[in-house]
Amino acid sequence: MAPKTLAILTSGGDASGMNPAVRAVLRTALNYGLEVYAIFEGYQGMVDGGDKIQRMAWSNTSGILQRGGTVIGSARCAAFRTHEGRRQAARHLLEHDIDSLVIIGGDGSLSGAHLFRQEWAGLLVELVELRQVTTEMALRHPALSIVGLVGSIDNDMYGTDMTIGADSALHRIVEAIDAINSTAASHQRTFVIEVMGRNCGYLALMSGLATGADWVLIPESPPDVENWEEKLLEVLRAGRKAGRRDHIVVMAEGARDRNGQPISATHVTKMLEDKLGEEVRLTVLGHVQRGGAPSAFDRNLGTLVGHAAVETLMNGKPDDEPQLIGMRGNRIVHTPLMQCVEKTRAVAEAVAAKDYEKAMELRGGSFNESFRTLRTLVRALPHPRDPGQTPLRLMVMNSGSPAPGMNAALRSAVRIGLDRGHVMLGVRNGFDGLASADIVELDWMSVDGWASLGGSELGTNRNVPGDSEYYKLARNLEEFKVQGLLLVGGWLGYQTAYQLFAARRMFTAFNIPIVCLPATIDNNLPGSELSIGADTALNTIVEAVDKIKQSAVALRRCCIVEVMGRYCGYLAMMGGLATGAERVYLNEEGVALRDIQTDLERMLQEFQDRKRLGLIIRNEFANVTYTTEFMRTLFEQESKGLFDVRQVILGHMQQGGSPSPFDRVQATRLAARCIDYLIEQATSEAPESAFIGLEAGKVQFRPLEDFPRMVDEAHARPKKQWWLELKPIAQRLALPMPVQPAPSAPKK
Ligand code: ADP
């Protein structure tokens, strides 16, 4: 039977993104008509009872989406580790008829929950014997249902690609390192930066990758040589010689050497200062990493897993094995809770036992791949070419509008290519540059510092060659003896790459492997659920909307925010989900006058009922006739002074800015794969061409010839767009709904 009462608590270390999850759990449950409680201060609140367990209404969940930490408090609780403590907790739950719990915490909190559930029946027997609850009360709740969500900045849990809070922490770290980088470069200084992660090097590894750090120390894979200090010094000295002005060493707090001896940040700092004979500064980032508003990704992650947690409880049976709900790629996944806890602990155990190979194996494929890529990118110079090797000549270029992360992709491509012994050519200014032979040979240092730069250092534009220019393109490819081409760009770049591929029989110069890497804020490319740049743009939108919301609180105002995306509604839809917009207008669904009228009537009603702020997000091409300006004037006219209406067109700020950690990391990872692909294809007898992408969290190549089949040409977007499925969830969480029947309840 579906639960009638549900409670949520956050436990252990707080993480940014817990609030979106709390909001989603409460609102989804309220939509099902459940009685909903928040338990304040984690397990401590459950043990203490009283006003620590409070009934929640829709209004309690307003305005928390953008807040860091957890509004319902979190704590560590010694009492819950004792049998008596848990018995008391059970009594307090029964007092409110609660037998379904959503717990957001780390592996400690989740194993506590598991134990509590196992003991439940026994605890009830004891409570009846002690006359603290009635037999009838106990019989009403024979079992405890729990669902776990992972809130942890370390990204250290099995069962989910990302834990709630890790992406926000990475934002904080990357912002800090970027800032330090600029001062370090001004004074030719070396900085040591310590980030969180006792057993998990995720934050250190990914921030190192994202900022172009010179050295990274993680617990799972200590330096593989005894004299690691010498090796580090060697790399830094060689870097200086090669022209680097600054050095950044990123280390996890749990860094250690091969023998399991902790390596402290002060030791590294002192050692470098002594041996390099220059000033070395240490920055321990500490709690900065936990703070701040959740990133767009964490808001959507928290929201989606929070929603799924309640769905799981509504669909489940009390004696089902408790599940942990996470995400793989963009899909919700359920995994038995204790399996996740055990596998997570196995990594810490392997690290403690100095079995680093096992620790890395348990961390999984993309962690290992990132670490391998990092080890190449941080080199002061590439490996020397084999004397017998005939280098390939590989070309890289951008095409289309700039997308944050393009530079990170090219940095990675160029360095990986050089390290494999090949010649790397760069085309300036997209296809115009290829037509006019604006081509340069790139060396190791020519891409130094590119990881964190927005825009396109090589240059890009939206010009594409006409048929008459193919001859010039072919001639230049031949002249420069190009044997493989990596194109990092958007729709027009993909389209052109496909056309060159299709014309390869006429122009033999086009008969080389071509690989396209998706880089556009629009996220409108086939073969990838996400394109590079979209995450940065989404964060820009979310930050802007947060400010707009704040500016409007003193008034009664409806804001209509127009976002980019051309005919693809991804930014509008995900921006709406992350900001709690009550309405999102998309071209994919079309906009009918009656929709606008319904929204207007609803809004009038709500403002009459004391609503203060209305938020609508509209894709720029949602409808050519019902423009943002049209909607503004219509709403303004009809509001009759009850509220004012403002339109905000976010415009090109969405294409700019420093790339988000996610965009940098994915760009680096995908570009490394593309170069390996080009090397493989260029040396094969029948070279193929492809576009790379992320699908269900995995890197995939699809044949370039599939491009036309996979897209809606007229609207320049893929035929299948996974994120459209999220629309009903966004809508259900934005506004209170008439009570939904429970899934298992018979329909009338
Ligand atoms: P995290 O959940 O972030 O890993 P902790 O390990 O500190 O953080 O756990 C948070 C709280 O969960 C603890 O203070 C305790 O109340 C509860 N808890 C953790 N482990 C257990 C356990 N084995 N048995 C019962 N309660 C536990």
Image: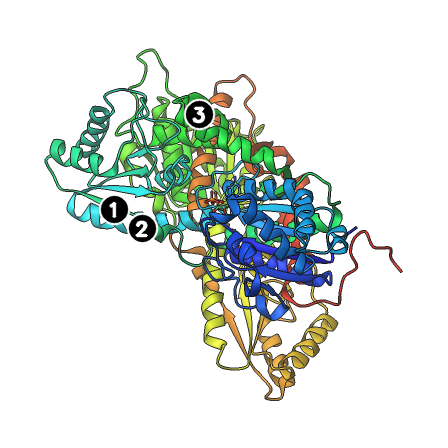
Residue at 77% from the left image edge and 55% from the top image edge: 136
Residue 7 is at least partly visible in this image: yes
Give the class, few, some or many, for how many residues have Cα within 10 Å of label 2's Cα (few <14, many ≥20): some
Query: Which of pointers 3 and 1 lies earlier in the amino acid sequence?
Result: 1
- Locate residue 540, reporting x and y percent: 45, 59
Mark nearest the camera among 2 and 3 is 3
Give the amino acid type for the residue marked by disc 1 in the picture: Thr
Q: For residue 37, which quarter of the picture?
A: bottom right
Separation (CA) of disc 3 from disc 1: 29 Å
Which mark, residue 341? none
Which mark, residue 350? 3
Q: For residue 613, which quarter of the picture?
A: bottom right
Give the class, few, some or many, for how many residues have Cα within 10 Å of label 3's Cα (few <14, many ≥20): some
Which mark, residue 176? 2
Which mark, residue 283? 1
| Residue 344 vs residue 443, the one in the foreground | 344
For the residues bearing labels 1 and 2, Cβ distance under 8 angstroms: yes
Residue at 34% from the left image edge and 25% from the top image edge: 419
Q: Which residue lies furthest to the right in this view?
A: 748
| Residue 160 vs residue 205, the one in the foreground | 160
Query: Which of pointers 2 and 3 lies earlier in the amino acid sequence?
Result: 2
Q: In this view, does 587 lie to the left or right of 109?
A: right
